[in-house]
């Protein structure tokens, strides 16, 4: 395609060589390209027009692949995967590269248009009053908020009184009466107060005790979280010099996690945008795992794991195409059409499964429901892991 636009002077016989200028492979004068490395068989000096000609040629070639890929994917569900695994590959774009491009395009559009960055302007950290280690209370600025707060306090107090009255009627093994329970609660509160006081009065001794006792990550994170806020330490080296932190993986993980958490709290919008931007890469770890379940469900079919993976990549690409179209429509007409994109994809996926795997409606429905349930479950796990991991790496 586009041959009429490309000048032929560079490939005329007068510029042909019998040896490749790149790899030295022996050539025939009729060879336009080296069969060993693919370089053009031409000795002509390059001019600016040659670069433009090659650019147009490559662009038009890619454009024709892209159009055929989009057409087959949209109009004939499952056909593009069957053609691709049967050897018809040059006509279509690479499924792995195509999906990665679409994923990056979609999430770039989403994060660019997102208003999540506005959350940074709220400056939640200025609205938070520290009342103790890892203990926060939100201040109110208006009379209306004060009255709401007072009403909530009265409601909470009444609920606590009712709870105490109900507790008196309940027999708890090992606890004779409500006074015993109150004593246990008070002892627990006193222990927490003593712990907090020790942490604030002697942070170096407190951390030393945590390290000697083999404290959990949560306890270490509580310490670092507190002193990253209260003190001027910025790096783990500061914590080593000032508080005697030992360079262990637990301490480093707790410190970095606490620091990232504080940063995420201070800039929630930026944190969410950065996390969402990682989703395209997560997909490339998620889909291969999900494909294992497709392979098991269709284990009697004569398809390899890679065939199933290509099927997954093609379908996921279609979903991103629909979401990109939905985003464009929403941006132009100020509507919300994402649900239509998911509805169309649901129908498309069912048809793709039927045509590619060649099974009846009943079997396809059962496998469709099972695989979608697995997909949602795995996706939920991936999202939780992504956001949790982002807190420690932000």
Image (tube, rainbow, N blue to C red):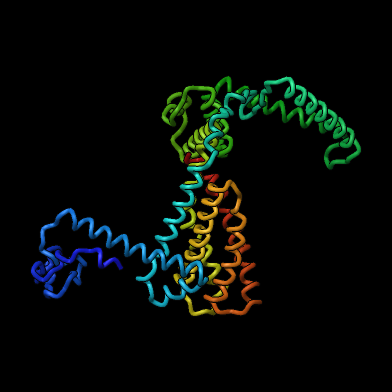
Q: Is residue 258 among what the camera can see? A: no
Residue 32, above or below 330: below
Query: Residue 93: x percent and y percent?
Result: 39, 65
Residue 114, above or below 98: above
Please give left or right for residue 336 compared with residue 145 in the image.
left
How many numbered discs, if any?
A: 0
Q: Is residue 58 among what the camera can see? A: yes
Q: Residue at x 73, y 20 (%)?
A: 143
Query: Residue 12: x percent and y percent?
Result: 13, 69
Query: Residue 193: x percent and y percent?
Result: 67, 25
Q: Quadrant of residue 92?
A: bottom left
Q: Residue at x 54, y 22 (%)?
A: 230
Please give left or right for residue 347 compared with residue 107 in the image.
right
Pick the residue in front: 335 or 24.
335
Q: Quadrant of the N terminus?
A: bottom left
Pick the residue in front: 382 or 247.
382
Residue 84, above or below 324: below
Pick the residue in front: 243 or 106.
106
Pick the residue in front: 125 or 262.
125
Please give left or right for residue 186 compared with residue 141 in the image.
right
Query: Residue 249: x percent and y percent?
Result: 46, 41
């Amino acid at each position: 395609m586009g041959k009429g636009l490309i000048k032929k002077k560079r490939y005329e016989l007068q510029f042909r060589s019998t040896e490749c200028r790149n790899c030295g492979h022996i050539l025939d004068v009729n060879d336009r390209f080296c069969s060993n490395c693919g370089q053009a068989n031409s000795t002509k000096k390059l001019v600016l027009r040659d670069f433009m000609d090659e650019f147009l040629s490559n662009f038009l070639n890619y454009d024709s692949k892209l159009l055929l890929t989009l057409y087959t994917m949209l109009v004939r569900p499952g056909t593009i995967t069957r053609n691709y695994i049967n050897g018809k590959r040059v006509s279509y774009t690479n499924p792995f590269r195509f999906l990665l491009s679409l994923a990056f395009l979609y999430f770039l559009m989403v994060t660019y248009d997102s208003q999540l960055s506005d959350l940074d302007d709220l400056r939640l950290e200025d609205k938070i009053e520290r009342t103790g280690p890892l203990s926060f209370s939100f201040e109110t600025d208006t009379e209306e908020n004060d009255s709401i707060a007072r009403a909530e306090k009265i409601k909470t107090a009444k609920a606590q009184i009712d709870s105490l009255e109900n507790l008196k009627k309940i027999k708890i093994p090992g606890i004779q009466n409500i006074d015993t329970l109150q004593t246990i609660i008070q002892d627990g509160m006193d222990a927490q107060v003593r712990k907090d006081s020790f942490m604030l009065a002697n942070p170096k001794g407190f951390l030393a005790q945590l390290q000697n006792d083999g404290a959990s990550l949560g306890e270490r994170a509580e310490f670092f979280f507190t002193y990253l806020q209260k003190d001027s330490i910025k790096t783990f080296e500061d914590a080593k010099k000032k508080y005697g932190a030992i360079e262990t993986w637990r301490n480093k993980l707790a410190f970095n996690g606490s620091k990232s958490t504080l940063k995420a709290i201070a800039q929630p919008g930026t944190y969410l945008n950065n996390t969402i931007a990682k989703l395209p890469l997560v997909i490339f770890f998620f889909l291969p795992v999900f494909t294992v379940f497709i392979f098991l469900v269709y284990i009697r079919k004569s398809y390899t794991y890679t065939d199933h993976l290509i099927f997954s990549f093609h379908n996921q690409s279609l979903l991103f195409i629909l979401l990109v179209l939905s985003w464009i429509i929403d941006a132009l007409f100020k509507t919300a059409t994402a649900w239509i994109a998911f509805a169309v994809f649901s129908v498309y996926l069912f048809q793709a499964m039927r045509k590619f795997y060649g099974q009846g409606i009943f079997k396809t429905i059962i496998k469709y429901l099972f695989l979608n349930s697995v997909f949602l479950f795995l996706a939920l796990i991936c999202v939780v892991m992504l956001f949790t991991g982002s807190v420690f790496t932000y």
